[in-house]
Image (cartoon, grey):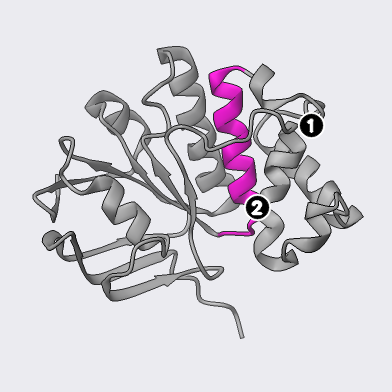
Amino acid sequence: MLETRRGLVLRGLDLSLSGQRVLHAVSLEVAPGEVVALEGPSGAGKTSLLRAAAGLLPCGGTILADGGHPALVFQQHALAGRLSAQENVLVGALGRLGFWRPALGLWPAAEVAAAEGCLARVGLAGLGDRRAAHLSGGQRQRVAIARALLQRARVLLADEPVASLDPKNAEAILTLLRHLAGQEGLAILVSLHQPDLARRFADRRLRIEGGRLWET
């Protein structure tokens, strides 16, 4: 029997933080191979929605995602500058390896090879030994995406991944996300402040304000 893939499905997500309701029964779907842009002003609930979908914030409702939990790519990379690009990517394997062996530097050879493969998939082949602190902003964001890929996620959530990048690197990162969706069948939900980029790179655009969502 062929596997039926759903991508990402959110149904009726409700979230309150510090006694304030942040998300109001939010529902959406992102199909495999699709890039959906999430737009809205600061404080509208974009980051809260992505973190809730990634399982980082407890919320009411239903979250269904291919491959288990979605992987979240943060705006500011969340890399350790003193570690190499490869070591930062390997952090994506901790969920299935535990912490004691990696803490001793005992990464399985298969995971090291997979990390190098993920770096190659994002255009950083041969840069695995370079410290993250010595990478450009665009390269650091690519490392963050490679780390998400090593989680074996089929759904990527990207929280303003190009907000701190110059226009050339911003376009390169969004082109990479489009490639991962189209060529590898990932479902990608990305929050963006730039409507022009959303129009050019997304298949659909959603807008959130006051914790309520609708399609533009």
Residue at coordinates 30% horizontally, 47% vertically from top-left?
A: 47
Q: CA distance from mark 1 to mark 2?
A: 14 Å
Q: Amino acid at mark 1?
A: Gly
Residue at coordinates 12% horizontally, 61% vertically from top-left?
A: 21
Find the magenta span and give its range.
136-153
Residue designated by label 2: 92
Residue designated by label 1: 128
**Can residue 31 be seen from the camera position used here?**
yes
Q: Is residue 159 left or right of residue 149?
A: left
Badge number at residue 48? none
Residue positioned most to the bottom: 1
Residue 151: give x, y in percent of width and height: 63, 57
Q: Main secondary structure of the magenta part?
A: helix
**Can residue 30 be seen from the camera position used here?**
no
Residue 50: give x, y in percent of width and height: 34, 53
Quadrant (top left/top right/bottom left/bottom right) for the N terminus: bottom right
Q: Is residue 138 left or right of residue 146?
A: left
State the count of labels. Answer: 2
Q: Amino acid at mark 2?
A: Gly
Say what secondary structure mark 1 lies in.
loop
Residue at coordinates 40% horizontally, 64% vertically from top-left?
A: 8
Task: Name which quarter of the figure residue 167 lies in.
Answer: top left
Sequence-earlier tag: 1 or 2: 2
Q: Is residue 36 left or right of residue 117?
A: left
